Image (tube, coloured by chain):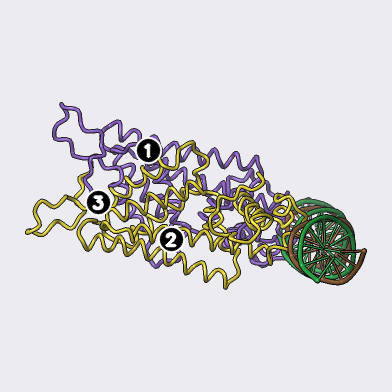
Chain colours: A purple, B yellow, C brown, D green
Amino acid sequence: MAVMVADVNAPPDVPPDARARLYAAAVQAFAAQGFHATTTRDIAGAAGMSPAALYVHHRSKEELLHLIALGGHRRTLALCQEAVGAGGGPVRALDRLVGDFVRHHADNPTTARVVNYELAALTPQHRVEIEALRSAIQTLVRDLIGDGVEAGVFATPDPMMTAAAVLSLGIDVARWYDETGWSADAVAEHYVGLVGRMVAAPAPAPDLTTAPPPAEERDRA
Amino acid sequence: MAVMVADVNAPPDVPPDARARLYAAAVQAFAAQGFHATTTRDIAGAAGMSPAALYVHHRSKEELLHLIALGGHRRTLALCQEAVGAGGGPVRALDRLVGDFVRHHADNPTTARVVNYELAALTPQHRVEIEALRSAIQTLVRDLIGDGVEAGVFATPDPMMTAAAVLSLGIDVARWYDETGWSADAVAEHYVGLVGRMVAAPAPAPDLTTAPPPAEERDRA
DNA sequence: CCACCGGCTAAGCGCTTGCTTACTATGGCC
DNA sequence: GGCCATAGTAAGCAAGCGCTTAGCCGGTGG
């Protein structure tokens, strides 16, 4: 039991030592091989300890996964909230959200992979908790895009689907980022541009007395 | 459940019976719980057979995964090749590729999840083989976008990154599609629009004697 | 009628798993 | 020094794992 700090989320714990080492080793192992392919011996060994040491600092292997997922989701949600809360209107908020979201996933692809692809291994209760955080993130992005459309600065036929696409773009970066040599900033910047074009309103609106065309007027051939 | 095949590629075998049932059960189980959390008993049981029956029709659990991954990737590659080979120029080809790619991943999210998220469980040799197919798909999309940029019908600062984004959009659909009530066609159509806007050249080119501005002229605020 | 053969299974082998137990070493405090 | 709490370990348990073995069963050809 030991310290039992009520665990804020991860290793801001008293000794930044063994517990944090186990946490870090679990992140690496879960990301590299998946939760179920990782043994408690793997984790303890990578942290330089005997198999039983894991249970001195953590209740179970699943609790480690829960800790990682919780911390990761809280950080992502906070990042999104800051982007939206900083003001400046939907355009600036979406730019910042996409930039920060992508940069975060490129800078932390290992954690992000665990956070996004290992959730099936959580207990039902923990799953529900994490799913609520994911839902909050999704709602935030949906509302941001919806607000922009209402304000006339974005144009997209279905804001919910577009929100799904924006989140997809960001999350999936973690899957392939470290196979590339690209810098996190370069990818983030590029993605801000892509999303900006995706949702751009057709014209800067020189005339809004007459009803604007409902988007979808792009000429392709 | 019983048969549930619907898969074109994998079991072109003599009896479309036990072998195909095991294959289908493996797809379901790998997608739902992951490869390592799935036991050979799970698969055989879901196929209505005893544990040992799996080994009458397949060499190992990993061979089943390999079969699934191979079939899935071949189908996706073929779909991309058809879109590009159908002619009509880069714009039409990209429209078709995105539409078909997204529709395929929405119609077969279960297979697609295995195909994209369980590759770490393959043996190194099988991994290499699958990675070659993925690389072919990626090259195809990169070249298509690159060609469009050269032809002046697309504009994007980094075609390789944009290709990564396009593939991300399509692949990630499989992760969330069946939590939604959206139709595959609706998602596909929407995504064709999103990608079209992402890569659209700035103007339909009414005047090409003067050099066109090198993209990035979007007014935001 | 029988020998055969492929599909299928009951039983189980050797090994690994997550986790527990019983114990030792260490260091601060009276 | 005596004491206890804490961090850590060696050993091991019950359960479950992938896969094999030996043999049954029913249909088919001679």
| Residue displayed at 37% across by 37% down | A159
Question: CB of mark 2 within 8 Å of CB of mark 3?
Answer: no
Q: Secondary structure at mark 1?
A: helix
* Image quadrant where residue A163 sits: top left
Q: Is residue B206 above or below residue A26?
A: above
Tag 1 subunit = A
Q: Residues within 10 Å of mark 3 (few under 14, many from 20)?
A: many
Discs 3, 1 touching: Cβ within 8 Å: no
Secondary structure at badge 2 equals helix
Look at mark 2 in the image and give the residue it sits on.
Answer: B78
| Circle 1: residue type | Gly
Q: CA distance from mark 3 to mark 1?
A: 31 Å
Inter-mark Cα distance, 2 to 3 = 25 Å
Where residue A138 appears, x then y in whole percent? 45, 39
**Which residue is at the front of the view, D24 or A189?**
D24
Query: x, y (%) of residue B211?
Result: 10, 59
Identify residue type, mark 3.
Answer: Ala
Task: Decide: few, some or many residues near mark 1? Use Cα within 10 Å; few <14, some 14-19, many ≥20.
Answer: few
Give the label, 3 or 1, closer to the camera. Answer: 3
The residue to which callout 3 is attached is B200
